[in-house]
Image (cartoon, helix red, strand yellow):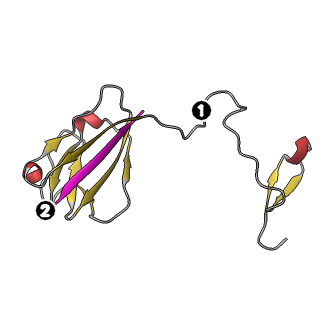
Amino acid sequence: MAGEVAYIGGAGTGKPTWVSSANPLPVTSGGGAGPAPYSATALGYQQISAATLATAQSLTVPATATFAWITCETGNVRWRDDGTAPTASVGMPIYAGQPPQLFSGDLATAKFILSTAGAILDVSYYK
């Protein structure tokens, strides 16, 4: 069927079932018990200014945070989480205007520095 997809297990038969607007793909949150696997609880927001990012900066991480969405405005930023401070030319880049990046490593070890003038770092924390 052009433009449609099938999934296995339609009506409990184990046979392919075509997905369409009349027969949408069923989506559950694990049998109805608990939140969906992609749910998250917001724990806070932090913005680090360009003046502060002139030197490598750590994040102010809420105690129970397990991941963060990170983005930058106006200028680019570099980061490292291996115990060595980033520099303006060494580290993983985050480019201004790009979609936020998911960071799920050890938030306490991450350090950030501006790599182009005017960079502002925006961080939203979750668990």
Res. 46 visible in picture:
yes
Q: Quadrant of residue 92?
A: bottom left
Image position of 71 (left or right of 111): right
Q: Residue furthest bottom?
A: 2
Q: In percent of the image, x 22 and y 47: which residue is there?
A: 47
At which x and y percent is residue 85?
Answer: 14, 45
User: Which residue is at the front of the view, 75 or 91?
Assistant: 75
Number of other residues with Cα within 10 Å of mark 2, as a class: few under 14, some 14 to 19, many 20 or more: some
Q: In percent of the image, x 58 and y 37: which residue is there?
A: 37
Split into 4 quadrants, where in the image is the C terminus?
A: top left
Res. 84 visible in picture:
no
Q: Quadrant of residue 75?
A: bottom left
Circle 2: residue type: Gly
Q: In percent of the image, x 14 and y 65: which residue is there?
A: 116
Marks 1/2: CA–CA distance: 40 Å
At which x and y percent is residue 11?
Answer: 89, 44
Q: In percent of the image, x 60 and y 37: which residue is there?
A: 36
Does residue 20 belong to the magenta stretch?
A: no
Quick check: marks 1 and 2 in contact, CB under 8 Å?
no
Split into 4 quadrants, where in the image is the N terminus?
A: bottom right
Mark 2, secondary structure of its residue: loop
Query: What span is in magenta?
Result: 116-127
Circle 1: residue type: Pro
Q: Earlier in the sequence, mark 1 or mark 2?
A: 1
Number of other residues with Cα within 10 Å of mark 1, as a class: few under 14, some 14 to 19, many 20 or more: few
Q: Which residue is mark 2?
A: 118
Vertical relation: 31 (above or below) 101: above
Q: Which residue is mark 1?
A: 35
Image position of 87 (left or right of 45): left
Q: Residue 117: which disc? A: none
Mark 1, secondary structure of its residue: loop
Image position of 91 (left or right of 43): left
